[in-house]
Image (tube, rainbow, N blue to C red):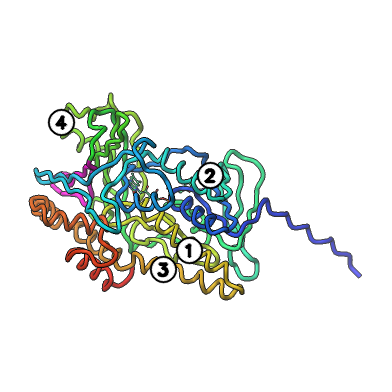
Amino acid sequence: MTEHAPPAPKKQPDAEADVIVVGAGPAGATTAFYLAQSGLDVLLLDKSRFPREKVCGDGLTPRAVKTLVGMGISVSEQDGWVRNKGLRVIGAGKRLELPWPELASYPGYGLVRTRLDLDETLARRAQQAGARLLEGVTVTGPVRDERTGRMTGVAAKATDGGEDRTYLARVVVAADGNSSRLSVAMGLRKRDDRPLGVAVRTYYRTHRHDDDYLESWLDLWDGDRLLPGYGWIFGMGDGTSNVGLGLLNTSAAFGHTDYHALLRKWLEGMPAEWGFTEENRTQPIRGAALPMGFNRTPHYYQGLLLVGDAGGMVNPFNGEGIAYAMEAGEIAARVIVQALGRPTAASTETALAGYPAALKDAYGGYYTLARGFVHAIGKPGIMRFATRHGVKRPAVMRITMKLLGNLTETRGGDAVDRVINALSKIAPAA
Ligand SMILES: Cc1cc2nc3c(=O)[nH]c(=O)nc-3n(C[C@H](O)[C@H](O)[C@H](O)COP(=O)(O)OP(=O)(O)OC[C@H]3O[C@@H](n4cnc5c(N)ncnc54)[C@H](O)[C@@H]3O)c2cc1C
């Protein structure tokens, strides 16, 4: 009889939970909040420690306000939130102020808040609800069942070095942002048939810091070509404005654009007294990608749900990502709670497999319309026509704002709401 060495003892996991959420940005923190509120044991892992910076425009529409309020977060001005009344659109020599619509479904105001503050508020809110937040933990890859390939947890290490760790759970959520290494490790790559944006931003000391409108500029020129995108100036209320611009990948200029130079050129045309000069710049110009219109699918695969930028959930119409990351977090949490309440592994799996359909119900048709829109404005003639003729007509712009901001009554509403909702319903889900 030959002697066999005993099998190496399996390393004990460092922690186990019902659900592991990777990434504690808006998507992950909201998912963890709703899971913990429903009584599940949640591990929320983030490679950073809060407060931490995130490249963003810091603008929150009424959709985002609704999600914050829904989580019981105080959004009062005493608590440091800066309110805005609507959107100021500037283009083709015209400027138009469009107040946010007053609806039953959404509040009639937006907010501005640095991501340093916003993301910490959200992460702490998830913690208060009972989620176990581990900061400074970088997830390095999935742990999978050897037989089925299904995810059973994640491998991780302390961001500042140290031993490898293992965390196990029945379900894992990838809320690790645009690059979503976890999704990639499970074979889920970005789709190149879906829109993508790139945006850059910085901050300037300026007297325009207490603007009560979010300002967006449609005139971004590359020589004589009008680019599909917009520039923004959002007053932070602290002596600075967040100033940036974003472009879509549907134009020929995408990939060949020097974003820093484009930003500088755009700002050179601003009145000198606004102070958007190098001496007044308080932060480096930094940029990142905006993954749009469900550009990573499927949203559920082998024990892993994708939420927020990880699942490419930025609205292609306007580049807004925070509200969609948070709303999708709530949808994912509701699916997981139901799934884990089922008696067998097979019935749990059936419920989890319903997550992509729940997302399609919420955004599928609308994102299909948005894809058509971004392809159209990728053609310089159409962008020029829309800017020149749209900004002159307040009624057209009010409708456009509802469509681009996805701000319609969910039920009923006026004629415009009903047309937008009907179009979103009949468009094939993205
Ligand atoms: C320049 C710019 C301007 C923008 N402006 C706006 C705006 O004004 N309004 C708006 O609504 N949206 C805006 N967006 C989009 C918005 O920033 C994103 O859609 C939003 O941050 C998505 O949230 P998220 O939670 O999915 O991802 P993220 O906010 O990217 O959070 C991901 C989290 O995962 C963590 N993480 C990543 N990898 C790991 C790992 N391996 N292990 C552990 N943790 C990990 C990160 O530390 C991070 O905390 C802008 C984007 C850009 C680039």
Q: Looking at the image, tell me whether mark 3 or mark 1 is earlier in sequence order.
A: 1
Reading the image, the residue beneath label 3 is 358
Q: CA distance from mark 4 to mark 2?
A: 41 Å
Q: Residue furthest top?
A: 279
Q: Tag 2's secondary structure?
A: loop
Residue 100 is situated, as x and y percent measured from the top left of the image, at 22, 50
- The residue that mark 4 highlights is 271
Report the number of numbered marks: 4
Residue 362's disc number: none
Answer few, some or many: residues within 10 Å of disc 3's Cα (few below 14, many 20 plus, some between 14 and 19): some
Secondary structure mostly seen in magenta is strand
Task: Give the labeled residue for mark 2.
Answer: 47
Quadrant of res 314 = bottom left
Give how far apart the Cα atoms at labels 3 and 4 are.
47 Å
Q: Secondary structure at mark 4?
A: loop
Mark 4 and mark 1: Cα distance apart in space:
49 Å
Where does label 1 land, which residue? 334
Mark 4 or mark 2, earlier in chain = 2
